[in-house]
Every structure is written in C-alpha cells, then in structure tokens.
C-alpha cells in the first residue's frame, strides 16, 4: 500500500471544510481560493475546485456575485451565506472532536 494514496484521500476528505474556512475570511475569486489551498499544501486544481464550489452553492452554503473584468470575461466571487457560516461553525466543532479522537487512537508509546 502506498502512503501517497492515503495522503491524497485524507486531503480530499477535508477539502470542502478547508474551502469553507478559506471563504470565512472574505469574498474570493476561485483562483485565489486555489492559491490559498496550495499555500497550505492542499494541492487543488480548477477541475477539482469548481465542482465543489457548485455543490456548496447548491447546498445553500455559498453565494457568488459577478464582477466585470478588464482583461477577459466577468468573474465570479464567492462568499459564505449565513447558512454556510453556521455549517462551518458546526464543522469546526466536529473537527475538534475528530482531531482529539485521532490523537487518542494514534499515540505511540
């Protein structure tokens, strides 16, 4: 078994949470979201991000607005909805509990 596969699955599992967390800091354009996730070593490409943004928007967690661009087509800027903020707060709580459980079960003596 390769550790790279497991690492990739772990990152995929927390990606939506990280996207919501990134957007909790303010409105962002998708390439800015990708940049922040890459800086955090969560490698993401547009082909991964856009379906997740659509799913989160369809779930009522995100909204977006269009802004005209001087150098190309209009751009979508995403932000959390009040429902998205509440959902993120619930995920924060769950994440804390999950981290404690993982630490408790993976400690080595």
Image (spheres, grey):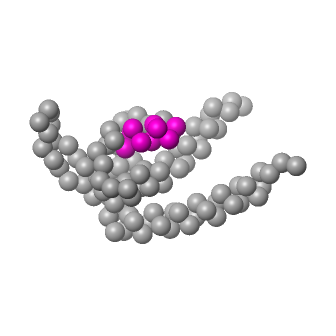
Query: Which image quarter: residue 59?
Result: bottom left
Percent x, y of residue 52: 39, 47
**Residue 26 drawn at (x, y percent):** 33, 55
The image position of residue 53, as x and y in percent, is: 35, 49
Whether residue 41 appears in this view of the structure is yes
Residue at the image point whose x is 57% and y is 37% from the top:
8
Residue 36: percent from left, percent from top: 42, 42
Asked whether 2 or 101 is in front, the reply is 101
Residue 48, magenta (yes or no): no
In the rendered view, would you say 59 is above or below 22?
below
User: Looking at the image, is 83 positioned above or below residue 98?
Assistant: below
Magenta portion: prevailing SS class: helix
Q: Which residues are magenta?
A: 33-41
Q: Is 87 on the left-hand or right-hand side of 104? A: left
Q: Residue at x 49, y 47 (%)?
A: 15
Left/right placement of residue 69 relative to residue 13 reads left
Corner quadrant of residue 72: top left
- Taking the magenta stretch, the answer to whether it contains residue 35 is yes
Q: Is residue 65 left or right of residue 60?
A: left
Does any portion of residue 57 appear in the rendered image?
no
């Amino acid at each position: 078994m390769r550790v790279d596969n497991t690492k990739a699955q772990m990152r995929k599992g927390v990606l939506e949470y990280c996207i919501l967390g990134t957007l909790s800091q303010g409105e962002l354009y998708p390439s800015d979201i990708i940049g922040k996730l890459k800086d955090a070593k969560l490698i993401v490409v547009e082909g991964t991000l856009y379906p997740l943004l659509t799913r989160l928007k369809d779930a009522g967690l995100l909204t977006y607005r269009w802004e005209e661009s001087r150098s190309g087509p209009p751009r979508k800027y995403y932000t959390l909805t009040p429902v998205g903020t509440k959902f993120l707060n619930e995920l924060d709580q769950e994440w804390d509990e999950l981290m404690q459980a993982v630490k408790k079960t993976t400690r080595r003596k």
